[in-house]
Amino acid sequence: MAKLEFIGVSKSYGRNVAVKDVDLVIADNEFFCIFGPPSCGKTTLLRLLLGLVQPDQGEIRINDQRVNALGPKERNLAMVFQNLALFPHMTAGQNLAFPLVERKIDKAEVARRVAAVAETLRIGKLLKKLPAHLSGGERQRVAIGRALVREPAAFLMDEPIAALDARLREEMRVELKRLQRELKHTLVYVTHDQEEAMSIADRMAILEGGMIRQVGTPDEIYNHPQSRYVAELIGSPPMNFIKGTFDPAARRFRADTFGFETTIGLSAPGVAGGVTSFAIRPEDIVIREAADQGSGVVAEVYEIEPLGAYAIVDVNIGETILKVMVPGQPSYQLRQPIRLDFPAGKCHLFDGATGALIAGAA
Ligand SMILES: Nc1ncnc2c1ncn2[C@@H]1O[C@H](COP(=O)(O)OP(=O)(O)OP(=O)(O)O)[C@@H](O)[C@H]1O
Ligand SMILES: [Mg+2]
């Protein structure tokens, strides 16, 4: 049971700003992901929570109590690191029991907790094996189990499955989600894999250079990015961007390099005009017959990437190449003229200078 909170937290190493002005509340019982590129401060946020480093400014709170002055043991949070270090000379069972033995908990209680955790993680059959005789996924489970036996207030995990192969990672993230639901514990999970964050998080925070750029559910982040930075970071293939100018009075966007103009509904009154980027996700663009009348813009099929259940069609309009995702295997010819439609509710407009959202999908 733990609500975790950062209030105005900053941390620098010399001139290097690791975390800056972070305000964040992670609710009790939440699966919360921290996502961002290398060196953006993800691990530092966990170390601040854990009590391994002190903030230069601001407060860390656990269940509404300021814990800045408390050491890691008193905070009772369990951390699973990326490089999980199991003791090689101990069996999986002894590794699981270790944090309890170290705390001098009595033998019967240790046995009870190890058995309970082994059952939850489905590793009962592995307890007598040495780490060298376990697969990567099995070792990972034992490492997670070692955090579970302590019955901590919350779990912090720093890219705990990044070292596993792709198939195993997919399995493990389903397991972790199931585990977190069953245990009803707060779990703060760091990853630089956007698909992983999107698939397991109840909510997520997106970081850039130590600052939080957006916090929300995966759906909010994906469908309502508040900045170009977030829009570019989430989604594969990434969002398409078209550079142009925006006239707020007429609510008209006009592309720089080809004859595309469209009316845009504003998300806030009084926004600035000028250089902007029009953005739309590959799966939101609609391809129609070139001869169709009405809205949209005529383009040409440039390349097709068949990917089984869907295909990516690269289309060009003048110098600009856009990616369109279509279900199944389309039968377009290369260089075939087509018409592209950009449904109004799926379009976003970002300020050319700041990258802030000017108008977004309703
Ligand atoms: N102990 C330290 N001493 C000096 N600089 C540090 C220290 N720890 C982190 N930093 C710096 O703070 C910044 C944030 O580091 P952090 O480890 O939190 O990033 P991260 O998001 O976890 O990166 P990665 O994805 O590579 O793990 C980086 O520029 C890093 O070099
Ligand atoms: Mg890190």
Image: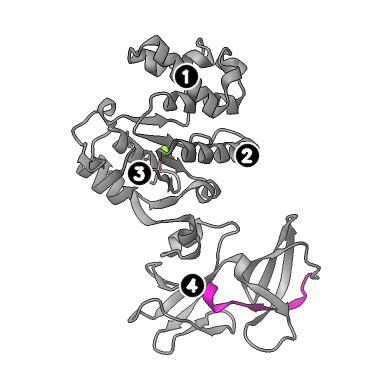
Task: Tell me the residue at 23%/36% (across/down).
Answer: 54
Whether residue 144 can be seen here: yes
**Distance from Cα at disc 3 to Cα at disc 2:** 30 Å
Q: Give residue 158's quadrant in the image.
A: top left
Q: Which residue is labeled 3 in the image?
A: 28
For marks 1 and 3 on the same chain, the one whose residue lies earlier in the sequence: 3
**Distance from Cα at disc 2 to Cα at disc 4:** 33 Å
Q: Contact (CB < 8 A) between labels 4 and 1? A: no
Mark 4: few, some, or many residues within 10 Å (few <14, many ≥20)?
some
Of badges 3 and 2, nearer the viewer stands: 3
Of badges 2 and 4, nearer the viewer stands: 4
Q: Contact (CB < 8 A) between labels 4 and 3? A: no
Q: Contact (CB < 8 A) between labels 3 and 2? A: no
What amino acid does circle 4 point to? Ala
Q: Which residue is labeled 1 in the image?
A: 114
Q: Residue 75 vs residue 252: left or right? A: left
Tell me the quadrant of ligand 2: top left
Mark 4 within 8 Å of ligand 1, using the beta carbon:
no
Q: Where residue 361 is drawn, which disc sits there?
A: 4
Of badges 4 and 1, nearer the viewer stands: 1
Residue range of the region highlighted in magenta in the rendering = 334-346
Identify the element where label 1 is drawn: helix
- Look at the image and say whether residue 338 sits in the magenta stretch: yes
Mark 3: few, some, or many residues within 10 Å (few <14, many ≥20)?
some
Mark 2: few, some, or many residues within 10 Å (few <14, many ≥20)?
few
Q: Where residue 166 is drawn, which disc sits there?
A: 2
What amino acid does circle 2 point to? Ala
